[in-house]
Image (cartoon, rainbow, N blue to C red):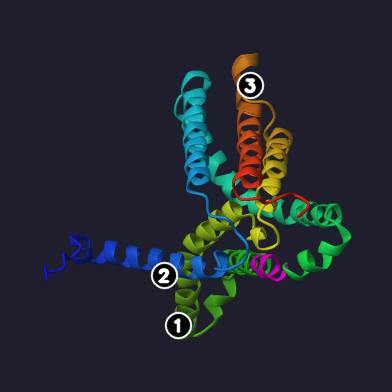
Amino acid sequence: MPPRRRNPLRRVPFLNIISAIIHSAHRVANRLFVPDGGVRINDPLVVRVQLFRSLLGLLATLALAFYYGRGEQAWHGAASDGFGNLIITPVLLIVTGPLVVMGFILYAPPHLRPMLRSRLKAPLRTVAWYVLSVAVCAAVIVYAGTSDYLTTLPKWAAASIAFVVLAVIVWGLPFLFLASLYSAKSAFNTAHVHPMLPGVLTAVLIWTVAIFNLIVEGTPEGPVAAQLCSLLGAPLSVTAVSLWELRRMRTRHGVVLRG
C-alpha cells in the first residue's frame, strides 16, 4: 500500500486554521442544506450545461465590465454585484418561492395535491435553517458593533464574550456564504416536492433578481446593446436552460408537470 501524501499546507499554522474553518462550515452547510433522498433527478448532462452557462455568464459579465466599465471601479462593481446576488437570491427565493410552490401545487391534479403538500417538510426545514442562520449572523454582527458596555465588565468576561463573538463571525460568514450557495442552487431542496419544481423556481427567480437589480442599481453603463445584454442575458439564458431541463425530464425521464 503506497504511503499517503500529506498536504504541505497543513504545516502552515495560519492556512491550517483557515482550512479547518472552511471545512467545518462546508460540512455543516452540506448536512443542513443538501439533504439526501426525495425525488430529485440527477442528470449529468443538465449539470454540465448549467455549469457551462454559469461560466459563460461570468465571462460575459467580465467582458462587459472590461469594455464599458470605468477601470478598477468596474471590476469591484462586478465582484460586489456577484456576491450581492448570491446573498439576495435566497432572500428573494424565500419571498417568491411560496407563491410559486402554491401555484405549482394548485396546478397539479386534485388527487396529487395532498401528496405534494406532504413533501413540503424538507424545503420548509431548509428555509427555517437558512432564516435562523441569517438571523444569528446578523444579530452577532450587530452585537459586535454596538457592544460598548463590554468596557464595564471584568476583563475576563469581556474577553470571553469578544472571543465567542469573533469565533461566530469567523465561522459564520463562510457558513452563510456556503448556505446561500447551496440554497440558491437547490432552490431550497424543492425537488423533494416535485423534480420539475427547481427548474420552474429558477426561471421565476432569475427574472425576480433581474428586476430587483434594475430597480436598485438602474441600467448598466454602455450602449443600448450592451445594456440589453447585461439586463436580459442572464434571465433569457437561465430560462432557456430551465425550459430545456424541463423538456429533458419529460422526454428522457418520463416526468410531467402535472404528474
Disc on res. 24: 2
Q: Quadrant of the N terminus?
A: bottom left
Give yes or no for residue 136 being in the magenta stretch. no
Q: How many other residues sit within 10 Å of disc 1, few (<14), some (14-19) or many (≥20)?
A: few
Q: Which residues are magenta?
A: 120-126
Earlier-in-chain disc, 3 versus 1: 1
Location of residue 16 by image quarter: bottom left
Location of residue 230 by image quarter: top right
Q: Residue at x 78, y 68 (%)?
A: 115
Q: Is residue 250 above or below residue 174?
A: above
Q: Quadrant of the C terminus?
A: bottom right
Q: How many other residues sit within 10 Å of disc 2, few (<14), some (14-19) or many (≥20)?
A: some
Pointers 3 and 1 in contact (C-beta within 8 Å): no
Residue located farthest toward the left when viewing the structure as drawn: 2
Q: Secondary structure at mark 3?
A: helix
Q: CA distance from mark 3 to mark 2?
A: 41 Å
Can residue 237 be seen from the camera position used here?
A: yes
User: Which residue matches tag 3?
Assistant: 227
The picture places residue 222, in percent across and down from the top left corner, at 59, 17
Q: State left or right for residue 245 relative to residue 167.
A: right
Earlier-in-chain disc, 2 versus 1: 2
Say what amino acid the circle numbered 1 marks.
Answer: Lys
Question: Front-most of 223 and 237?
Answer: 237
Give yes or no for residue 122 being in the magenta stretch. yes
User: Which residue matches tag 1?
Assistant: 155
Earlier-in-chain disc, 3 versus 2: 2
Question: Front-most of 71 and 61?
Answer: 61
Say what amino acid the circle numbered 2 marks.
Answer: Ser
Q: How many marks?
A: 3
Q: Residue at x 54, y 68 (%)?
A: 36
The picture places residue 154, in percent across and down from the top left corner, at 49, 85
